[in-house]
Structure formats: C-alpha cells, structure tokens
Image: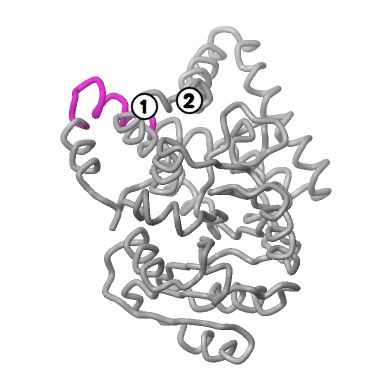
C-alpha cells in the first residue's frame, strides 16, 4: 500500500498528462500511486498512460463529464494511500518533490499542506510571464506561497495534499469555482492543521495565451465573492486590491487628460513590475509580457470581483447560490 495517492482530474489534456507522468516516473522517491480520472474527455490520455504503465503504479479511470471536483472525489473513493496529493494535469513535478515532501511531513506532520509553483525553463515566454503575474508580491501579495504574504496561506489544488482522516471527516470537494479554497477553509474550520511546505514546489504551465488567462482570472474574481457569501470572515483587504487597481487606474487615466502627472503612480507601478520581472527572468520580452499579464491579472480579477459584488451582494442575487452550495456535501 503506497503512502501517497496522487489524484489528477483530466479533460482533453493528453500532451500535458504525458509531461506530468514523465516527471513522476523520474521521482527519487516513489512511495505513491497515480490515479488519473478522465472526466468525459473527447481526446483521451490512454496512450500516455500506456507509455508509463511499467514505470508507475497508475490507475486510469474514465467517467462522464461532471466537473473536476467530482472527478477528484471519484479518485479519492478509489485511492489506497494514507495521504492524498492533488496536482493539475498541466503541472510538471521536480524529481525530488516526494523526497522533500516525505522529509517535511516526518519532521513536522501536518494534516493538510500546500506548496508554491514556479516556471520551468521549457515554458514559453507567455507562460513565464503569466507565472510571474500569479506569484509576484507586486501582483498577488504573495498569497500563493510567496516568502512575504499579505494573507494566511491557503492550499490550492495545483499543489495540495491532505490525509485520509481529513477526507473521512470533512468529505470531498464541492463542485464550484475556487473549490480548493472552499475545501481548505472547511479543513481549517474542522480543526485540522494546515501548512505551507515551500520546498515542495511544482512547475505549473497555467494558460498558454493571455486571452485564456483573462477568462480564467475573471472567473477567479467572481468566485471570491461566492466564497465571501459562504465564509464572510475570509474576505480580506488583499482581495480588494485588484478592484482598487481597476477603479484607481481608470481614475488616473481619465485624470491624465486634464492633468498629465495623474498617470504617474500607475506608470511607476508598471515600471516596477517590468524591472522586477526583468531581474528575475533576464529576458526583455518576458518583462514586457509580464506587464501585460499583470494588468490582465489585476484588471480581470478586479472587474470580475466588482461585477459579482454588485450582482450578488448589493442586489442580493447570491444568497440562493450560496445556500445551494452549502447543501452540497462534497461527495
């Protein structure tokens, strides 16, 4: 019986699954099984599974499309490990990941953990820029595992794990946007310990172009209000910052038509984003793309947040939705 059960929901990602399985086959510690749940894909990853069947203990399931949360729960129901690990299918795992994780849990056991993400050298310039915008303190306040953080760390399912005991007491994921934040909140409310294991990082490809990134981040902004309706005390100042960025940027742009120095704070901020990205990546193109990705990250999230706040809180349209989510048991 393996100690870890890796659970990955998959939807039309055969190439990414191949990269994920390749990275898992190169782990220095292999006390794990891999459970892939194909969630109604029309382009399956069976060929990739077959390719690594001799190198890994893989359990491959195909089910009708019901959503990634239900797919993860389906995997947990069939897992044999004592500790469940969750990756997204677009992750690549460093070869010492499970060696590092095992040592960390042996030193200071935690019921639930999360780790940060990084950009691999093989990623495209756009993916590296998006990774910067999602991990930089200048854009997200370090909430995804940064060394300096404006909010208590919350594990997310691109790199997250919890014990079988957590699953048996708390249940599985609920089908909703930001289901991982919902799950982490329920785990914390149940009294379990949660920790950031910073050295257990993954390479996360994220979106391949800025258009898809905008759509994703807009949904993140809207889902934050859904989480607020479920857990009012979880809405922090850091979550308002993108909305402030949107309102403030519009005010500065309009004001610059009447008094040009009004745009200087925004220009200086974007210059700081550019300089920090250039220092980190040493590529002019990535630094330029990082500015674009950061504007999309803050602007998309802020617009989604403001729209959802107006519709669901001010107009009161979110109460029924919140009650419906509360009734879901995460099974």
**3, 255: nearer the viewer:** 3
Could you classify mark 2 by the number of other residues whose Cα lies within 10 Å: few (under 14), some (14-19), or many (20 or more)?
some
The image shows residue 13 at horizontal and vertical percentages of 47, 73
The quarter of the image holding the N terminus is bottom right
- Disc number for residue 246: 2
- Looking at the image, which residue is at 75% across and 73% down? 28
**80, 38: nearer the viewer:** 80
| Label pair 2/1, CB-CB below 8 angstroms | yes
Q: Earlier in the sequence, mark 2 or mark 1?
A: 2
The image shows residue 297 at horizontal and vertical percentages of 53, 39
**9, 75: nearer the viewer:** 75
Q: Is residue 160 magenta?
A: no
- Looking at the image, which residue is at 67% across and 75% down? 30
Type of secondary structure dominating the magenta stretch? helix
Give the number of the mark in front: 2 or 1: 1
Could you classify mark 1 by the number of other residues whose Cα lies within 10 Å: few (under 14), some (14-19), or many (20 or more)?
many
Relative placement, left or right, of 149 versus 183 is: right
Q: Compared to 51, does 254 lie above or below? A: above
The image shows residue 150 at horizontal and vertical percentages of 61, 26
The quarter of the image holding the C terminus is bottom left
Tell me the element at label 2. Answer: helix
Residue range corresponding to the magenta coloring:
305-318
């Amino acid at each position: 019986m393996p100690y870890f059960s890796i659970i990955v929901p998959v939807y039309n990602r055969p190439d990414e699954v191949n990269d994920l399985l390749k990275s898992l086959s190169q782990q220095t510690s292999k006390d794990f099984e891999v459970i892939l749940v194909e969630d109604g894909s029309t382009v399956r990853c069976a060929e990739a599974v077959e390719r690594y069947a001799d190198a890994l203990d893989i359990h491959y399931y195909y089910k009708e499309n019901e959503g990634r949360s239900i797919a993860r729960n389906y995997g947990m129901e069939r897992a044999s490990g004592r500790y469940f690990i969750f990756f997204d299918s677009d992750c690549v795992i460093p070869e010492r990941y499970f060696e590092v994780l095992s040592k960390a849990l042996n030193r200071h056991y935690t019921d639930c953990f999360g780790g940060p993400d990084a950009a691999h050298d093989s990623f495209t310039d756009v993916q590296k820029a998006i990774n910067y915008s999602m991990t930089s303190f200048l854009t997200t306040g370090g909430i995804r595992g940064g060394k300096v953080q404006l909010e208590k760390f919350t594990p997310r399912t691109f790199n997250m794990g919890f014990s079988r005991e957590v699953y048996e007491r708390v249940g599985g994921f609920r089908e909703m946007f930001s289901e991982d934040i919902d799950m982490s909140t329920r785990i914390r409310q149940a009294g379990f310990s949660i920790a950031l294991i910073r050295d257990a990082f993954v390479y996360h490809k994220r979106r391949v172009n800025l258009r898809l990134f905008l759509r994703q981040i807009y949904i993140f902004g809207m889902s934050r209000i859904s989480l607020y309706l479920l857990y009012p005390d979880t809405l922090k100042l850091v979550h308002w910052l993108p909305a402030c960025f949107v309102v403030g940027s519009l005010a500065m742009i309009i004001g610059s038509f009447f008094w040009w120095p009004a745009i200087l704070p925004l220009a200086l901020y974007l210059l700081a984003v550019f300089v920090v990205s250039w220092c980190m990546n040493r590529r002019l193109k990535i630094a330029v793309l990082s500015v674009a990705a950061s504007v999309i990250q803050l602007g998309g999230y802020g617009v989604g947040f403001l729209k959802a706040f107006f519709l669901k809180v001010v107009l009161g349209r979110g109460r029924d939705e919140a009650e419906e989510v509360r009734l879901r048991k995460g099974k």
